[in-house]
Image (cartoon, rainbow, N blue to C red):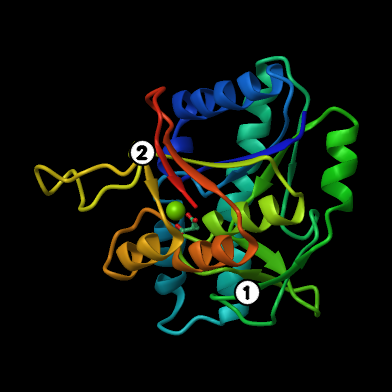
């Protein structure tokens, strides 16, 4: 069986219990025979808290240092999730952006991924390891840490799915799919079973926060089918294709 990508957002890895819930989803897929690469966001409000700390230092922090700071959020959550997967008895390694060959433009705070050298990831999968990838981060030609913009871990997941020719790209969230309006605010919002890339882009541009816009554009370009699923309920989500 082939490679699958599973992405867990900040809410889905926010604390010990949720980390183990994500770890269980990962190890179930591995038990079913897939090679799993799981991509994580920073835990809970970590990114906002780090931004707040930077603002305490000065009103206009260096963008290079801001990226170095923000990337620690995903580095921490990937290491914690790898530990949780290990506790369930499965071998796992966390990889930061620079370790897994995510090369970006030299733009801080909003970098585009230029390419992914998949060698390290493939060798870890070959050894039987589950890979827990830090989302949202890469390195540029100067070997400096860059980040992909708020919500950028979704883009990491789709870029990895394209580079690894993955069989599936599953994005786990605290909602159970894509809705015509925010189901927490609007009664009668309708859930899509399937939605096209263009419709999804329209929703995202009108403020739906389900998927990062560059992630949808990349998925459309690379023809990556995305499944948006709930971390907390075992039921079908929305397929974006
Ligand atoms: N942690 C980053 C953010 O909060 C990236 C992400 O969650 O995808 O924007
Ligand atoms: Mg986040």
* Mark sitting earlier along the chain (2/1): 1
Classify residue 40 by image quadrant.
Answer: top right
Residue at 64% x, 62% y is 222
Is 183 or 93 nearer to us in this picture? Answer: 183
State the residue at coordinates (46%, 65%): 150
- Residue 162: % across, % down: 69, 55
Residue 154, percent across and down? 53, 55
158 sits left or right of 230 in the view = right
Q: Position of residue 88 (x, y in %)?
A: 66, 16
* Disc 2 secondary structure class: loop
48 lies left or right of 125:
left
Quadrant of residue 55 within the rendered picture: bottom left
Q: Position of residue 17 (x, y in %)?
A: 45, 23
**Image mark for residue 112:** 1
Asked which quadrant contains residue 33, the reply is top right
Q: Which residue is mark 2?
A: 174
Q: Residue at x 37, y 53 (%)?
A: 210
Residue at position x 56%, y 80% in the image: 63
């Amino acid at each position: 069986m082939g490679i699958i990508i599973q992405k867990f957002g900040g809410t889905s890895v926010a604390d010990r219990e949720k980390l183990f819930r994500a770890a269980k989803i990962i190890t179930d897929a591995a038990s079913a025979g897939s090679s799993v690469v799981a991509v994580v966001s920073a835990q809970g409000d970590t990114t906002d808290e780090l931004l707040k700390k930077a603002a305490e230092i000065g009103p206009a922090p260096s963008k290079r240092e801001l990226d170095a700071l923000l990337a620690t959020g995903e580095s921490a959550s990937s290491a914690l999730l790898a530990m949780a997967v290990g506790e369930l008895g499965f071998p796992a390694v966390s990889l930061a952006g620079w370790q897994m060959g995510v090369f970006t433009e030299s733009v801080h705070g909003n970098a585009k991924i230029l390419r992914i050298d998949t060698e390290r990831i493939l060798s870890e999968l070959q050894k039987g390891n589950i890979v827990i990838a830090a989302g949202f981060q890469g390195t540029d030609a100067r070997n400096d840490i860059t980040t992909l913009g708020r919500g950028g871990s979704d883009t990491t997941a789709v870029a990895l799915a394209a580079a690894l020719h993955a069989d599936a790209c599953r994005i786990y969230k605290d909602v159970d799919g894509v809705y015509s309006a925010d189901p927490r605010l609007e009664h009668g919002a309708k859930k899509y079973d399937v939605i096209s890339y263009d419709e999804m882009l329209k929703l995202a541009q009108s403020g739906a926060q389900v998927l990062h816009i560059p992630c949808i554009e990349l998925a459309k370009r690379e023809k990556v089918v995305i499944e948006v699923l709930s971390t907390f309920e075992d039921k079908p989500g929305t397929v974006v294709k």
